[in-house]
Image: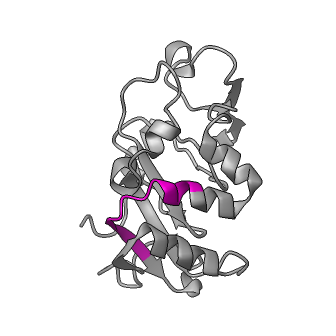
Amino acid sequence: MSIAGAPLREISADGAAPWETAPREPVVVRGLVRDWPLVAAARQGAEAAREHLLTHDAKRMLAVSTGPPEIDGRLFYNADFTATNCELTRETLPAVLERIFAHRDNPRPPLIYVASTTIDAAAPGLAVANPPPPRLPQALASIWIGTKSRIAAHQDVPDNLACVAVGRRRFTLFPPEQLANLYIGRST
């Protein structure tokens, strides 16, 4: 991971918490959540990770962005910027995971994406079973679940600590002075 072409500083989770000692800059903390049961389940395979999530299912409807394989997982706008290029549906966690698993060997799956949903809304008890890192300031805990997705450049309002428990995530970071350049298209 890099910012402006320079590699990000990486630190081990075995040391002091980065939010206590690091300057306010992006940093990669290797191994921070390696002891989570969800991470351990993922090491056993996708099915075990799915079962761990389903153990904590809230049995609620979740907002799910869906789109055809042709968008290559890219959530964006349609050609004339009058709407998004995907559809928003509501599904249960088991239904979402079933659809994702149906395409897990597909090199070009449709977009199926639950974005930034509070953990308690999707899977109460997941945060208790997989507790936040120690000495972490109280924060909103969210979960992202889906097939391959690409999200347009944007600014998250809160500071983030992204913990990857299953799969991979890649971030492209922009310096704060680029804020004015991060949004295009409709604001609603």
Task: Work out which quarter of the rendered image holds the C terminus and state it.
Answer: bottom left
Which residue occupies the foreground of this view, 108 or 138?
A: 138
The reply to whether residue 73 is in sight is: no
Return the x and y of residue 72 as percentages of the image width and height.
Answer: 59, 78
Q: Nearer the viewer, residue 125 or 101?
A: 125
Residue 167 x %, y %: 67, 56
**Quadrant (top left, top right, bottom left, bottom right) of the N terminus:** top right
- Range of the magenta residues? 52-65
Q: Residue at x 62, y 81 (%)?
A: 102
Whether the magenta-drawn stretch holds residue 99 is answered as no
Q: Nearer the viewer, residue 176 or 44?
A: 44
Residue 161: x and y in percent read 50, 36
Which residue is depicted at the point 44% across and 72% down?
76
Q: Is residue 175 above or below residue 20?
A: below
The answer to whether any part of residue 158 appears in the image is: yes
What residue do we see at 67% from left, 81% from top? 108
